[in-house]
Image (cartoon, grey):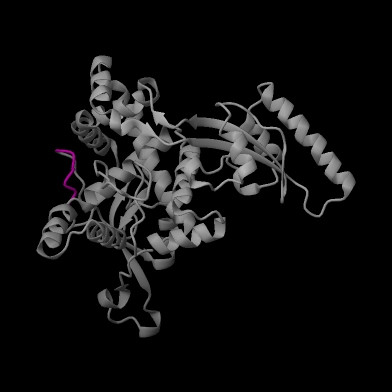
Amino acid sequence: MLSKVVVCIAATAPFIHAADVRIVEEIVAKVNGDIITRGEIQHNRQLLEQDLRNQGVTGARLQDELKSREKDGLRDQIDQLLLVQKGKDLSLKVDADVTRRLAEIQVQSKITDPDKFHDWLREQTGMAFEDFKQQMTNQLLTQKVIGEEIGSRINIPEADLRKYYDEHKGEFVREDQIFMSQILLSTEGKTPEQIAAAQKKAADLVARARKGEKFGDLARSNSDDPETAKNGGEVPPFKRSDHLLRKEIEDVVFTMKKGAVTDPIRVPQGLLILRVDEHYEAGQASFEEVKEEITQKLAGPLMQPKVRDYLTKLRADAFLEIKDGYVDTGASPGKDTRWKDALELKPQTTTKEEVAAHHKKKLLWVVPVGSSKPTGSSAPAGTAAPPKQ
């Protein structure tokens, strides 16, 4: 994933024998306990260029746009890292949001097999599935920090929200779509006695769910599908028009309301229990259904200057050092961010392997704060669209 930035120790110490030369990655900024590398900045530029090309920007216009936006490259990465760190300090969780966004992308890809979907994501993004998932986690975490620390303090009068709804009703016409969670009890390779026991267990789980036990907890403890069980049983959303569900299942779940739980359904893998987490019926969405969405639309322009002020404050409170030759265009006025003696602090370079391990955990080059997604993206709103590599 990292661009192949090669810095040879021999370049600064010519007396070292050729056999001792090591490939390293240059650190250009330290942000509290984390780092930003030159390779990450270069890779971020490549992603920006690809995204612009995907939008049809070419030639001189492409170069002008790159020159205009890449000057803020280090700023955007520092912004992202500070917000991720703040989210962790606030103990914010976005696991359920990540699961839902990934499920939406999978439905849009029309690939139901998890392994094939992971391969498709790699082709589209140049990233392993876990790296793409971490990128999305970091992005959603920054959005949640901004929402809680800034957005929650912005009040849009309900009259303005209703006015927007009345003037833009066409934006809120929905298809018949359903969000569900599942519990799967496998019967593959089981004896008749074991199948009977599974049937009894399935009936018991349905009864418990209908009495009010949390379906997600039941799924985590009982489902034999590990991929969905770890996320409380959540599965991709389905539109009726896609016809991706077996007809006998589709005919049942699309007649159910939010919170309803099916009887056990026999499928090739075993016994399936489904809970309807949300059901958007086809037609015009009501104001109450889309009120939060409208609030976010109207709050966006009001939030941008406040976000910048907030990030300036985070910088003022952070341990931040930037190497000579690199500029943070969002610097906090009066804060000394000069690179100190490398011998007294962390080294300016580290091994390529160490940086790769760090980079796997800390993806710093996601969509910068304030970016807007072009329409037509295959990714859900607020998610970095997978650029074609």
Q: Residue furthest right?
A: 193
- Is 147 covered by the magenta stretch? no
Q: Is residue 112 left or right of residue 190?
A: left
Going 64% across and 41% down the picture, which residue do you hit? 248
| Quadrant of the image occupied by residue 305 | top left
Going 18% across and 59% down the picture, which residue do you hit? 57
Going 25% across and 39% down the picture, which residue do you hit? 315
Q: Residue furthest bottom?
A: 18
- Is 329 covered by the magenta stretch? yes
**Res 300 visible:** yes
- In which quadrant will I find the N terminus? bottom left
Quick one: 336 or 237, which is closer to the camera?
237
Quick one: 67 or 18, which is closer to the camera?
67
Q: Please, is residue 103 above or below residue 91 in the view?
A: below
How many numbered markers are drawn? 0
Q: Position of residue 33 (x, y in %)?
A: 38, 47
Give the magenta-colored segment's residue range. Answer: 327-333
Quick one: 95 or 279, which is closer to the camera?
279
User: Magenta stretch: dominant SS?
Assistant: loop
Q: Please, is residue 353 above or below residue 30 in the view?
A: below
**Res 155 visible:** no
Q: Position of residue 299 (x, y in %)?
A: 25, 27
Q: Position of residue 354 (x, y in %)?
A: 43, 62
